[in-house]
Image (cartoon, helix red, strand yellow):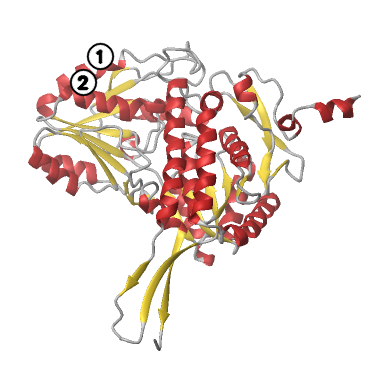
Amino acid sequence: MESMLTKLAPAATRLGVRRMSSLGPEVDVLLKDKAYVNGAWIGAASGKTFQVTNPMNSQVITSVPDMNAADVSLAVDAANDAFQTWRGTTAKYRSDLLRKWFNLCVANHEGLAKLLTAEQGKPLAESRGELVYGSSYIEWFSEECRRIYGEVAQSPVASKEMMFIRQPIGVVGMITPWNFPNAMITRKVAAALAAGCTCVVKPAEDTPLSALALGVLAEEAGIPAGVVNVITSSRQHTAEVGKVLCESPKVAGISFTGSTKVGKILYRQSANTIKRLGLELGGNAAFIVFDSANLDLAVQGCMASKFRNAGQTCVSTNRVLVQESVVEEFIGKLKAAMDNLVLGDGMKDGVSQGPIINKSQFDKICEMVQEARGQGAEIVVGGEPHKSAGELFYKPTILTNVTESMSLYREEIFGPVVSIKTFKTEEEALALANDSRVGLASYFYSENISQCFRVAKKLETGMVGINEGAISAAEAAFGGIKESGLGREGSSHGLDEYTNIKYMCFGNL
């Protein structure tokens, strides 16, 4: 009887869907408890698993394979084998498959959003927004796929012709973060597939389910076995999995989004095989408010930049620098806007801030705020956990009298904390903003057009929001300078990380 029931069960259930979750039928068809390697849904060779929990209430959603170095080596082999065929496919063929994948993501929008909120904690409205954003990368690269052009150069010798063509680099290892578990994958994988590369994706241990759900839809779209592989591992095995991806001679490139500290480790580990590296690392974004600014727009931009995903974004405002003459008015308007934030379960209507992702990150926020208070910072609002909302909630906070020596000024706090420091002149604001070893994003508000051009050019970051707090888009070249990384994602430049330029010289013509 059991074997007959197994035969009658939906194929998706037999292949690893966790039957009848509490999240609804639109999620059940996407929820997997197996990794996706070479077109098959498999467990770790050891049989070990680890739990994925909801940060809102610590409830277990499901368990997924806890894969190690041996498991990831099999995934690399599968991607390498698939590359031998995938590299020879036409851009039209790859474009059509990416378009099918995009259409499936759109059709499964609500299920993907609910799954994302369940494992990551952000409000459902934000998850829906991330899904639109994430899917836009698949759509964008399905179109850019057919625009990977070469060049014909003018030869210095009449008997020669010189041509440059772009070819895929090979297998790409992708290590993605927990804060945007859909979009950080789609903008890497879509670009790689468009260029003709194959990939092995290692999602963050906190949020592997969104990655596996993308694998479900990639399979349904008809993307061949081995082209997209998704492996899962706990914190215990994350380092060894990353090491295999960096050191394997079969892996041609590494794409990583995460902390500068980990990025440097991956950089060193990739040195022996001289891999192509795309590193989107930590930031410490300055948000400058000049006395010429429209303060209502500045507050609106600060709210968008600082409190999206409870401040857990790489381009989140970290240091708010306000010209002395407008600081009191700015703080008053900002506090009023923050009073409208609603903390709670992201699945409920009206909630605008969810929990911090895990206990480690929550404790870091608490410690950094307490340290700043001990060094003289003053709390305008917040400054403590919000236990009535849940164990991992932190109250939206404004700190003043912040100094350069405080850790929450020097480092990303990755939480809903606004640190305010004043300045007198434009030159001082630029000196403060640029006094950082990282340079991902920065923002400033000014109604003075000459000042806008001057400041935008002088800010030492890869991206600048000018009278704008939301700068991300598939069409934008996303990336940083200094210790914030290498390369760009999105835009036409997003394909550069996944192609080699081959020079072909035709002689004796």
Reading the image, the residue beneath label 2 is 331
Q: How far separated are the C-alphas under marks 2 and 1?
A: 9 Å
- Is any atom of residue 193 visible in this view? no
Horizontal and vertical percent position of residue 443:
24, 37
Q: Which callout, 2 or 1, points at the residue further toward the start of the chain?
A: 2
Which label number is shown at residue 137? none
Name the one closer to the observer, 213 or 446: 213
Horizontal and vertical percent position of residue 129:
42, 27
Q: Secondary structure at mark 1?
A: helix
Q: Quadrant of the C terminus?
A: bottom left
Question: Is 16 displayed left or right of 7 in the figure?
Answer: left
Q: Secondary structure at mark 2?
A: helix
Name the one closer to the observer, 226 or 64: 226
Q: Which residue is outermost to the top? A: 388
Residue shown at the point (15%, 43%) measured from the top left: 455
Q: Amino acid at mark 2?
A: Ile
Residue shown at the point (53%, 56%) measured from the top left: 197
Question: Is 443 displayed left or right of 486 in the figure?
Answer: left
Reading the image, the residue beneath label 1 is 336
Placement of 480 over or under 180, stated as above or below: below
Q: Quadrant of the N terminus?
A: top right
